[in-house]
């Protein structure tokens, strides 16, 4: 009669595999932590060594007589030995190991800031250093709207894409790490809203910001006038205009042009602010010469910016106007009569258009030819800016004929478009170019 305890006969077959599984699991977890904490070369060596050790131990266990305690003792001793071996190898081969993401010094990048607000980039002309890594701090301020920055290898969106930034939904910020750019001009757009465009000007020694120290000048708007109508700054120094819109509930901004009026080449178009509000406009460095500035919403608000120093542009930075800006190629009758309607043959005509829920209510307008035309515009979208622009032809790529004042709803405006020749015209909203319509004149 066997003296073996029945309880031992029941428990041992259960305990041995359970304990073995726990030991194996602890060993596997510990080995995984070791492999993850060392270099790739050390991890490979340890894994191969442990695998060979496991095979050798298994072959030895198979030689023991069935039912003896030797295999169990050998298994535990082998696990302990392998753990000691792996730990020692980790210390020997992993000493001084630095993860790849920590290797070397951090790359220094030239930083620039670009803001997206009101479906526009601010600023639109960004000087950057050539041949240096670039960090673009991008701030999307349009709540619930997606934006990003996509950079092209040239001045057209048909050029190869150099950089395609992550799309973020505002309000949000992101820093884009851009590889060095060679000297030249690069178009950037928002992939989601391709009408949002700007330009990176990469120049030797900082993209034109070579000369002097940064300069800040103060400007404010009050009573529909600029407080300072004559500003001065040194040439080739990065310029910031600290703008303070003090007119409560009224929109203002600052635009800068080469020359003595708004017909010159646009240099800067600042973010539109609804007062009271302040903004710092990064205009960038300018060459010596005379510049004109105004407010896009209230073009009668004007002033002059004089840039003093060497390197004055030939002609004082003024763009020569064409002799007959409204005369079509090859002569003939201009398509648009003067806005005052002095040459119009017919009686003055008014048509009505409204903006509601980011759409034009009518969309299809009609008017007689050669009659002074007024568009009575009603912006019904509370807190949203709209206007009406008119172009020749069937799209915004036609010749621009009229650009109405931007008004924030609810508000109304009477746009004096002037007489138009018979034909088909396209109109849209400058702030929301997806709002479009057709004007038939005849």
Image (spheres, rainbow, N blue to C red):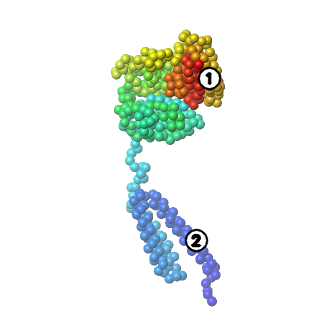
Picture coordinates of residue 146, whole percent (x, y) = 55, 37
Quarter of the figure that contains the N terminus? bottom right
Q: Which residue is painted at 59% across and 25% down in the image?
A: 438
Q: Nearer the viewer, residue 370 or 390?
A: 370
Image position of 210 with respect to 1: above or below: above
Which quarter of the figure is the C terminus placed in?
top right
Do labels 2 and 1 touch, CB within 8 Å?
no
Q: CA distance from mark 2 to mark 1?
A: 85 Å
**Within-10-Å neighbours for mark 1: few <14, some 14–19, many 20+:** some
* Residue under label 2: 18
Residue closer to the observer: 272 or 346: 346
Residue 96 is at least partly visible in this image: yes
Tell which of 178 and 21 is nearer to you: 178
Q: Residue at x 47, y 74 (%)?
A: 58
Going from N to C along the chain, the mark reached first, 2 or 1, is 2
Q: Locate residue 10, reporting x and y percent.
A: 63, 78
Callout 2: SS: helix
Q: Residue at x 50, y 76 (%)?
A: 73
Give the class, few, some or many, for how many residues have Cα within 10 Å of label 2's Cα (few <14, many ≥20): few
Q: What percent of the width, then of the height, locates residue 360? A: 62, 27
62 relative position to 18: left or right? left
Which residue carries the number 1 mark?
365
Q: Residue at x 55, y 17 (%)?
A: 420
Q: Is residue 284 left or right of residue 67?
A: left
- The tag on residue 297 is none
Q: Is residue 78 shown left or right of residue 409?
A: left
- Nearer the viewer's eye, disc 2 or disc 1? 1
Outermost residue toward the top in this view: 342
Q: Position of residue 324 (x, y in %)?
A: 45, 15
Residue 305 in view, yes or no: no
């Amino acid at each position: 009669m066997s003296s073996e305890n029945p309880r031992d006969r029941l428990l041992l077959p259960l305990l041995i595999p359970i304990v073995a599984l726990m030991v194996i699991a602890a060993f596997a977890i510990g080995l995984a932590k070791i492999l993850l904490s060392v270099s790739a070369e050390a991890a490979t060596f340890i894994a191969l060594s442990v695998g060979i050790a496991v095979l050798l131990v298994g072959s030895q266990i198979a030689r023991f007589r069935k039912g003896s305690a030797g295999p169990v003792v050998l298994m535990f001793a082998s696990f302990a030995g392998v753990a000691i071996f792996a730990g020692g190898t980790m210390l020997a081969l992993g000493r001084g190991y630095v993860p790849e993401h920590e290797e070397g010094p951090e790359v220094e990048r030239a930083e620039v800031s670009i803001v997206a607000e009101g479906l526009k980039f601010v600023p639109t002309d960004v000087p950057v250093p050539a041949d240096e890594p670039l960090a673009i701090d991008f701030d999307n301020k349009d709540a619930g709207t997606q934006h990003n920055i996509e950079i092209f290898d040239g001045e057209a969106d048909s050029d190869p894409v150099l950089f395609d930034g992550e799309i973020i939904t505002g309000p949000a910020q992101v820093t884009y790490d851009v590889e060095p750019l060679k000297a030249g001009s690069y178009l950037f757009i928002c992939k989601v809203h391709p009408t949002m465009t700007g330009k990176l000007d990469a120049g030797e020694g900082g993209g034109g910001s070579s000369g002097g120290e940064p300069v800040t000048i103060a400007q404010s708007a009050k009573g529909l006038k600029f407080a300072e109508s004559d500003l001065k700054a040194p040439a080739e120094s990065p310029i910031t205009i600290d703008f303070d819109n003090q007119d409560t509930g009224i929109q203002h901004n600052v635009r800068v042009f080469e020359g003595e009026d708004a017909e010159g080449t646009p240099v800067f178009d600042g973010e539109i602010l609804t007062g009271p509000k302040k903004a710092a406009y990064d205009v960038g460095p300018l060459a010596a010469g005379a510049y004109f500035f105004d407010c896009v919403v209230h073009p009668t608000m004007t002033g002059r910016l004089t840039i003093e120093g060497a390197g004055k542009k030939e002609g004082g930075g003024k763009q020569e106007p064409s002799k007959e800006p409204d005369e079509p190629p090859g002569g003939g009758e201009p398509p648009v009569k003067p806005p005052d309607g002095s040459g119009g043959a017919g009686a003055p005509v008014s048509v009505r258009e409204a903006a509601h829920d980011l759409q034009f209510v009518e969309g299809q307008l009609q008017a007689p030819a050669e009659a002074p035309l007024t568009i009575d515009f009603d912006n019904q979208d509370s807190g949203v800016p709209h206007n009406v622009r008119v172009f020749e032809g069937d799209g915004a790529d036609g010749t621009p004929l009229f650009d109405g004042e931007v008004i924030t709803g609810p508000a109304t405006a009477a746009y004096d478009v002037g007489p138009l020749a018979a034909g088909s015209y396209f109109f849209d909203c400058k702030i929301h170019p997806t709002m479009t319509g057709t004007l038939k004149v005849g």
